[in-house]
Image: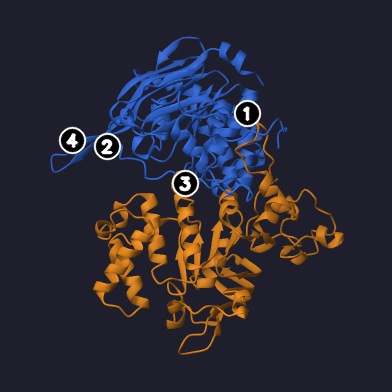
Amino acid sequence: MTGPQSRADTRKLLEVRDLRKHFPIRKGLTRRKVGQVRAVDGVSFELLEGETLGLVGESGCGKTTTAHCILRGLEPTSGRILFRMDSGEVVDLAELDESQLRPLRKQMQMIFQDPFSSLNPRMTLLQIVGEPLLVHGVASARQRRQRVAELLELVGLSPDHMRRFPHAFSGGQRQRIGIARALALQPRLIVADEPVSALDVSVQAQVLNLLMQLQDKLKLSYVFVAHDLSVMRHICDRVAVMYLGRIVETAPTEQLFSAPRHPYTAALLAAVPAPDPRVRSQNEPLSGEVADPADPPAGCHFHPRCPHAEERCRQQMPQLEAISPGHEVRCHLARQLTLEGVEIPAAKGSS
Amino acid sequence: MPPTPMASDVCTPLLSVRRLKTVFPLDEGTVIAVKDVSFDLHAGRTLALVGESGCGKSVTARSILRLLDRPGRIEAGQVLLRRPSTEQAGPETIDLAKLDDDGPRIREVRGGEIGLIFQEPMASLSPVHTIGNQLTEAIRLHRDVSKCEARSMAIGLLREVGIPQPQQRIDFYGFELSGGLRQRAMIAIALACRPRLLIADEPTTALDVTTQAQILQLLRQLQAQHEMAILLITHDLGVVAQTADDVAVMYLGEIVECADVDTIFHDPRHPYTRALLKSMPAMHATNRGRLETIAGSVPHPFQRPSGCPFHPRCPQVITGQCDCQAPRLRAIGESHQVSCLLEEAGS
């Protein structure tokens, strides 16, 4: 595993700049536009080669919309999505049309959340995993069979099961099928949208281990979308916390968990129930709810729920500011507040 | 004001499930969803039923309330609900498993003495009735009050579960509320008749973490106020650690280990409980560390393994014993029961 130092030297694979996605709200007979939901409102981040970046936040924060925009599953309203191709050339994915985008799709793939609805029940594993190969015309029928067998083995399934249909497999196995399909064209970027949240905890661990193994083996880069912070803790190198369509904090994982600087990050960390009855939380949980993204509060979007909010927060939207290298926070009070993170026990070995 | 319980009442459990067996006879074969499950629920305490999907935890809850989907039925066992003495009658014990599942007696219990919260508040609230309609219906089914009184009681309940502006929200429909408020409304309906037992089936699974923390705190407060017993069904061990007093771990329809919460987390004895705890991604773990896993997955219910149900996945399996001899749940300490041949050999 490479340390953060050598990681910084590797080149950027993906750079998202000021990405916005607004959904119109239409009403009445003429479907006139009466407002808009700012699902993603100025998101910027970069992903280095071989790195895992986590996008975390509660439902409605825009993390999934961001993920879909990167792969152009959704049309972004504005912003740039700079992707460095394997030839070394940098392209803006947001500007390309469908035909220009198609050859690039080989290099970026998606893993979906629900292993039950993301696999066609009327196709066999051979057809499902082999479909990307067929679409991109990269293999003859025999080569395809061979490649599918390799892929199934790679994700820990038996190639003998190639003729079976998805219903014959459990949730964890189906998610492996989805991963094999994503890997078929040897992509460099994988966008994984909540890949383990539909799985039971024992199976979830298997799939997370598989994703980490594959990354080391195939030099993959992940954009990992999830709402579960403990999963993030395990798999991500860096984490970006989103709230109401904006990134409020990004930091290397260890730093984000041990020393969060945004009150929302701290509240999220405190809300995760500790799996130990001896440390029962005495903290008051964060009050209130996520505001309506069609009508966000003025100033800092988080101020109505923030225990530290002051006058400035109600009027002025804070900017994302670097407080140390690699640690950016969108909070007026980032430098003043001391927030509680999660204690990290001194090198206990991997347990 | 309920009469103060006598000394003997304190230790008598509110509800006792004894050797419950629930089966689903299907065309392809019979699925034993719950097998020989026994546990007690005490006033003011929370028992968590924990396990992965398909382990029978929800079916257990539905068996207690006799809400099984067809063709499921209780094949054996008892579900004993104890009623305190009232002015009209002395204390009595009724076996819910023997009642007609559509009769008036079980309906009196459902929503009256036992409240139920489901996982998905959107699917369990009626889309064509307001929250107020559904609340007053629950109240008037079990209590003889006028519509007007029921409405003011409903507003009181909404306030109690922390819904802001209850006078207005009472006329909202379920879909007009956010996930957290919807779940609060569900809790208000479940609590409408001050049940002595609340069954919460994955009450926070569909919610965000900050909302989950709010709902769990609310449940704790309400339990302390009303001395309710709670049967909490969940797969989230974090939620268990934070809310339960006692824990029963289920695997393939059987309870494999049962103990107080501290013992389960700090001295687990069954290999499945241990594996489950280890495979949990922890917040304070090292970054990119390999997670412990349990080999394989939960077997298909038609292919129930012989002997111990966990033996094909067990890291400590004794070949020749675990696959032919079914272990029995036995006490290995004060309020600690395990069903494992390793423990039988050890004692």
Which residue type carries mark 1? Leu
Q: Nearer the viewer, residue A173 or A149?
A: A173
Q: Colour of chain B?
A: orange
Q: Identify the residue position indicated by label 2 in the image.
A: A294
Relative placement, left or right, of B51 versus A132 is right
**Label 3, label 1: how far apart the Cα atoms are:** 41 Å
Q: Identify the residue position indicated by label 3 in the image.
A: A284
Q: Secondary structure at mark 1?
A: helix
Decide: is B251 above or below A97.
below
Q: Nearer the viewer, residue B31 or B126?
A: B126
Q: Nearer the viewer, residue B302 or B89?
A: B89
Q: Identify the residue position indicated by label 1 in the image.
A: A214
Relative placement, left or right, of B268 versus B154 is right
User: How far from the left and from the top, in percent, is residue B249?
Assistant: 65, 58
Q: Nearer the viewer, residue A224 or B218?
A: B218
Q: Residue at x 62, y 73 (%)?
A: B20
Q: Identify the residue position indicated by label 4 in the image.
A: A33
**Label 1, label 2: how far apart the Cα atoms are:** 40 Å
Front of the two marks 2 and 4: 2
Which residue type carries mark 2? Ala
Q: Secondary structure at mark 2?
A: loop
Q: Earlier in the sequence, mark 3 or mark 4?
A: 4
